[in-house]
Every structure is written in structure tokens, then in C-alpha cells.
Amino acid sequence: ARPEALPRDLEGVRVVVSAGGTREPLDPVRYLGNRSSGKQGYALARVAAQRGAEVTLVTAHTVALPDPAGAAVEHVSTAEELRQAVHAASEAADVVVMAAAVADFRPANRAEHKIKKSDDQPDPVITLDRNADILAELVRNRRPGQVVVGFAAETGDEHGSVLDHARVKLKRKGADLLVVNAVGDGKAFGTEDNSGWLLGSDGTEIAIPLGAKAELASTLWDAVVRFMKR
Ligand code: CTP
Ligand code: CA
């Protein structure tokens, strides 16, 4: 939809969106990262601002994307930096959306100097430590009335469909809303299906048809507006 066609139903609502993929350094030149493009989070921030929200975008690494118009943008790199920035911004927020791909683990040691290969030393082994679960912390610290939204990418497998996994994850995460993107589906690996589900803790389940990331953003903000009205 063109911006002027969008409802102004988020006027005065303070929104925090996290986006992109975190990077966990191994040494000054290397990191463990992921393939998040950041496009979904940016679309969420842009659409929220177009609908009148006061938006803070906390973004880790993305493909080249312009800052969304009307949003305050904070750039971070590691999961721990994202965590600090999201918690600080969330204190005054009405809605927090965790669209970032947060590394579950970080290298236990960060070498001060570039790691060198050597013929008389054994090859290095990377040990990982668990990062804090930011979404779980947000749920734990949630103020009354604050809406917390999570994202997940799931595949169907022998234990159940995408929707089955999504229901379990929503329960486990304790979020108010969970957007689940269906990926892979055990078939043609690599062909990414952008359809999915939007699940609410009130039992609502909305199928998300294949479409642009701005369309998914609109569907999510519609659901958030309904959630805030309950
Ligand atoms: N998330 C988070 N902090 C982490 C990891 C994930 O806040 N350290 C958030 C993501 O931003 C996303 C949601 O949790 O909104 C779900 O992420 P996902 O990786 O699907 O869930 P995990 O609990 O990490 O489960 P899994 O073991 O399947 O990766
Ligand atoms: Ca994870």
C-alpha cells in the first residue's frame, strides 16, 4: 500500500524493532555471523513510522539498506550490544518486536590479535558460550500492557508441521505474538518460502500468504493494534 493509504492507527505508540544479524567476533578480523538481510525488520520499522508510531530501530548487520524514514536508528554489532540497546529502548516502549537474527552462541574467547595458522601448533578449536535470550528477558520484564513480538523460522519435520513447531515455540517463548516464517519444508532446500503464520497468545492463528515484507509488516501491525485494544 502507498504510505498515504495506510491508517494512522499507531499514532503516539512507542515501538522498538530489532533487525539484522549479529556478529560474534573471533579475533579482530573474523566473526561468526548469519545470513539475515535485515529487510523484514526495516520494513516493520518503516511501516510503523508510516502509520504514526514513534519508532526506534536497533539494527545489527544488514545488506545495504537506507535508514527507514522517521525512525531513530541505532547500529550495533554483537548480540550483547543488541541486548543492551533493545533493553534501554524498551523501557519506555509500548511494543517491542524482535525481528533480529540473534546469535545463540558467541566464541568463548576473543583473540586480541589475528589468529595465525602454524605448522607446529594444533589447529584451533572454537568453544562457544551461550548468549542471553533477549526475547525471554523482554517477556520476563514486560510492563503491564506492553506487547512483545517474536520471530521464528521453522521447517516441518517428522515431529510436526511448521504450525505445530510454531505453537510450541510461542508457548515456550511466552511472547504475545509470534511471526513464523516457513522455510525449507524438507523439500527443495535453499528455495525459501516466505509464507508463514502469525500466532497470538490469545489463540489467534493467521496464515500469512506469500508476499512482500511490507505486506507482512502491515499484517503484524494490524494484529498489534487489535492486541492493544483488547
Ligand atoms: N532471540 C533473542 N535472543 C536470542 C536468540 C533469539 O531475542 N539470544 C529471539 C529472536 O530475535 C526471535 C526469537 O528469539 O524473535 C526466536 O528465535 P529463534 O532462533 O527461532 O529461537 P530460539 O529460542 O533461539 O530457538 P532455536 O534453538 O530454534 O534457535
Ligand atoms: Ca536461535
Image: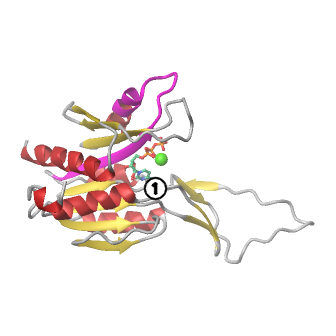
Find disc 1 in the rendering and name its residue: 102
| Crowdedness near tag 1: few (<14), some (14–19) or many (≥20) residues, C-alpha within 10 Å | many
Q: Is mark 1 within 8 Å of ligand 1?
A: yes
Query: In this view of the protein, can residue 16 be seen by the observer?
Result: no
Colour convention of the picture: secondary structure
Q: Is residue 204 left or right of residue 105?
A: left
Q: Is residue 160 above or below residue 44?
A: above
**110 left or right of 48?**
right
Above/below status of 28 relative to 37: below
Answer with the quarter of the image where residue 176 lies. top left
User: Could you tell me which secondary element the residue under label 1 belongs to?
Assistant: loop
Quadrant of image for the C terminus: top left
Residue range of the region highlighted in magenta in the rendering: 146-167
**Farthest front residue in view:** 2
Residue 53 percent location from the top left of the image = 15, 63
- The image shows residue 26 at horizontal and vertical percentages of 64, 66
**Left/right of residue 29 with respect to residue 50 in the rendered view:** right
In the image, what residue occupies the spot 28% across and 47% down? 216
